[in-house]
Amino acid sequence: MNDTAMQALLVAIVLLPAAGSAAALLPAPPGLRGRGPDQAVLRHGITVSGLVLLLSIVLAAGFDHDRPASMQATTDISWIPALDIRIHLGVDGISLPLLVLTALLTFLCALYTYFRMPEGPGPRAFVALLLLLEFGMVGTFVALDLILFFLAFEVVLIPMYFLIARWGGEGREPAAFRFILFTLLGSAVMLLGLLLIGLRAGTFDMVELAARHGDGLSHGVQVLAVLAIGLGLAVKAPMWPFHSWLPDAHTAAPTVGSVLLAGVLLKMGTYGFVRILLPMAPDGMRTLAPYLAAFAVVGILYGSLACLSLVRPGAAGDLKRLIAYSSIGHMGFVLLGIATLTATGVNGALFANIAHGLITGLLFFLVGAVKERYGTANLDQFAKGTGAALYGNAPRLGGLLAFGAVASLGLPGLAGFWGEMLALFGAFDPGAGLSRPTYLVFMSLAGLGTVLTAAYLLLVVRRVCMGQHPAPAAAVEFADVQAHEFAAWSPLVVLTVLGGLWPAALLSLSDPAVHNLLGGPR
Amino acid sequence: MSASPLIQSVDWAAVAPPLIVAAAGLVVLVAELFLPEPRKPLLGWVSVGGLVLAGLSLIPLLDGDRTTFCLTAGGKDCSYVADHFTLAVQFLVIGGALLTALLSIHAVEEARMPAGEFWFLLLSSAAGAALLPASRDLATLVVALEVTSLPAFALVGLRRGDRLSSEAALKFFLSSVTATAVMLLGVSFVYAATGSLHLGAISRGLDHVDPRLVTLAHIGAVLTLVGFAFKLAAVPFHFWVPDTYVGAPLPVAAYLSVVGKAAGFSGLIVITVLGFGPYAHVWGATLAVLAALTMTAGNVAALRQRPANAHSAVRLLAWSSVGQAGYLLVPLAAAGYDDKPQEVIGATIAYALMYAAVNLGAFAVAALVGRAHPANRITDYRALFSERPLAALSLGFFLLCLAGLPPGVIGLFAKVAVFRTAVDAGLGWLAVVMAVNVVVALYYYLQWTALLFARREPVEAAGAAGAAGGSAAGGPVPAASADATGAVAALPVPIPLTAAIVTALGLGVVLSGAPELVLRFATGTLF
């Protein structure tokens, strides 16, 4: 496919959600009214996000797989000459998978919402916010100007705030405010770091800055920039100890919000590390990488220990909260991979990013379905503590949940395995200038984390899927997996298996680009 | 001065903007005598017409090369210059006054303020503010500044029989008069040291002042700046702001926060950059410290406002405007450290244009809410979205612009432009102080914004089922709480007020899409 067509495709992928979001607020045109305004607008959401997904698949097909290290489908026009800010868009092997993941998850969310609208105000605003969210997420992954990246990074906050605050469950308003306050304070500091790099280097262009590999930026500036930008990204990722907004936000968010929050929003943080900090401030990263790795490992252990305490009988642990804490652990692996500063580790981090998006997206869908059926996600309230007996009540749902859990604990053969293994490999032999013994300690601690992860996920399966059947008092009959649920979940299941069996498909895309970013010889 | 041709030809087109505003003021004052009581609202529309006309009169001047009232002998110093700087500030002043007028039309009627006086004072003050950026000699500057300020005192005290209003006017008057006296002393010192009132001549003269008079010239420069610092409400001359804003009629507070500030700034820019250029080392450092203190004091005070206190909304806006004045001062301070100070202050103009649009917008929504809730507490804004979605969205947008967050893109970039001047000038510490302040300010702007979209507490308890029923949460409310919930929605909105909000919103949105429209002032020189 020629360049102009690719460029038009990418621009359409970015602009369609924004236009669709505005259009969702208008009354439906004649001929598209459907069975009523609500149904019409929900269908509109599916149409637009489906179109975006289709276009991004076409883009992925047209992507030149022989040179994934270079930016493709680029657009570069001047926006604000006074500040030298440009509208510079493009994709390479690192951003393309994330772009497709975003389009896929948004489409699945729109599809799921069509059949099961969360309780709250009408669907019109919901669809508009969902598409606005997609606009911000897509924009973050394709922006190639530091300021543009920041803008897109911020655009997602407002729709996510409202998705939680208006359609969420218990405690939604404080949770939503905490979410926006944490991420905003982080990103305000991040903006300072971006300005520091941009003003010192004389350009905001990410391609140009990446090609320079930190030339012209003194060591002090780089350390400062990594601290400031890293803080903003670490809040988003989230890295321990800046994670405390995440469990509340996930617990309160509606299913769709949780899926996108865990599936895409968290990735924006780690993506920023790879896209901005690794290539633009390599010296600063080298200085601070051991600290990042240490925080990442603490996050891994903390996340799994928190999950273990939530899953105990009598702890009244909320299943959504548990998955949220497990995300902190999984993102710890991603950060550890990045902090090794090796191609292996960063490839692992990018792989784990995608895998976590698929698996945790699936898990949040499943937990949402369980919560819908039982009316609660509290582990102790399922069937009076003996277990929810999902295998008996709804065998397919139970099977899927077990599948999600073992995928999440990193069973070889499923997508969760490769990323974490590569991250550990990277830590086994960290990049030049990093202390190997330190990283070996990190690696073994992270290895311990995988064991703990396996432990709590198996306990979750034990407590949710098994149990006395039929549960004596509450012998509720409820539906197994519905057609629409099956439609929304099966792509995630298929991709999880595919990612586990054929990791090369993804790694061959990211590997050249990672080498390019790290600046070393191939 | 030997004026060879006795009668100078005046470039009437160049002086048209302030002149039309002043003429409209006089027309209103005279017309009021002949208008019967029920026709009084016409005066407001006459004023709006005058301001629109004045705005249109800027168009022929767009080349920015007109001067008038020039010296015929000696240097080529002119007293009135219509360059790009002047035009930008005049556009701001006239536009700001126009929005204020739209806000005032119903307020004048409802508060039973004397219509003729109100409009006359408003237009006079605006005429002074429009004259200020064009003035290029100290006498014209002082006169313009006083023409801006004196009517403002009267405007603040115009709510007859309101103790708060009179007290505010007195406070404002006393502190302002002190500042003016100090400034006049400074002006006379400068005159004594340099022998000229024209800024160009002063700038040349300061380089070779008689060594015995150097101290005098320094003191004169500092004292002159003090006068302007007061108009800007820069620390430590900011104490009049919150009480004055709360005591004044709301449109007047809006006017003071935008046009009053713009006048102070343009005067300060003209006098420092054009007049006191050789003393940049003195005022550069002074303004940097002032900027840091001003933004910190304003933001800390805004942070301490309790949302449930009476008038907390206006108080918060007042303190936030003090904080914003601090940001506006940053490029000015940076100009003191730059070889080409005239190219740096463009960032202030860009920022001021952004600030004018969104701050007036915020005041407009506050005026709207104030109709139903005279106490104008921040808690009164809870769930505004469910009653008046457009007003809530607008206010949210304005507050995010002030905070500098997307979707208030223009607020963000204006801050970036200001920030850049500090970094470029080597004022790293000031850049850090500004960054900390921006972050601190996020909290209170966000809290208010979040409140707009929060749910109304009583409704949530009473009608969990009702809330799910439809997006119009105002509908199924028990009659008992109706007066509390639907108060803002119940009152019809006057058309001029709507127009003001929509105009400000439109400006903000257009600027957010195309920030270059104002940010181009931030590069290159305006003079």
Image (cartoon, rainbow, N blue to C red):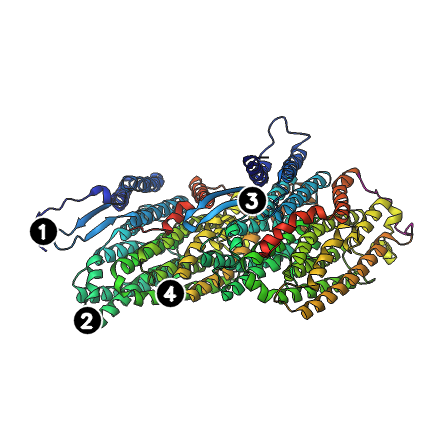
Q: Which mark is residue B3?
A: 1
Going by the numbered disc 4, the residue's amino acid type is Ala
Relative to B481, B497 lies left or right: left
Going by the numbered disc 3, the residue's amino acid type is Gly
Q: Foreground mark, 1 or 3? A: 3
* Residue B389 position within the rendered picture, expressed as x and y whole percent measured from the top left: 55, 43
Q: Residue at x 74, y 54 (%)?
A: A418
> Is residue A356 or residue B144 the one in the foreground?
A356
Relative to B271, A452 lies left or right: right
Give the chain of mark 3. A
Label 3 packing within 10 angstroms: few (<14), some (14-19), many (20+): many
**How far apart are the two marked residues, 4 and 3, measured between alpha carbons?**
41 Å
**How far apart are the two marked residues, 2 and 3, measured between alpha carbons?**
63 Å
Marks 1, 3 in one chain:
no
Going by the numbered disc 2, the residue's amino acid type is Leu
**Magenta span of residues:** A469-482
Q: Which mark is residue B288?
A: 4
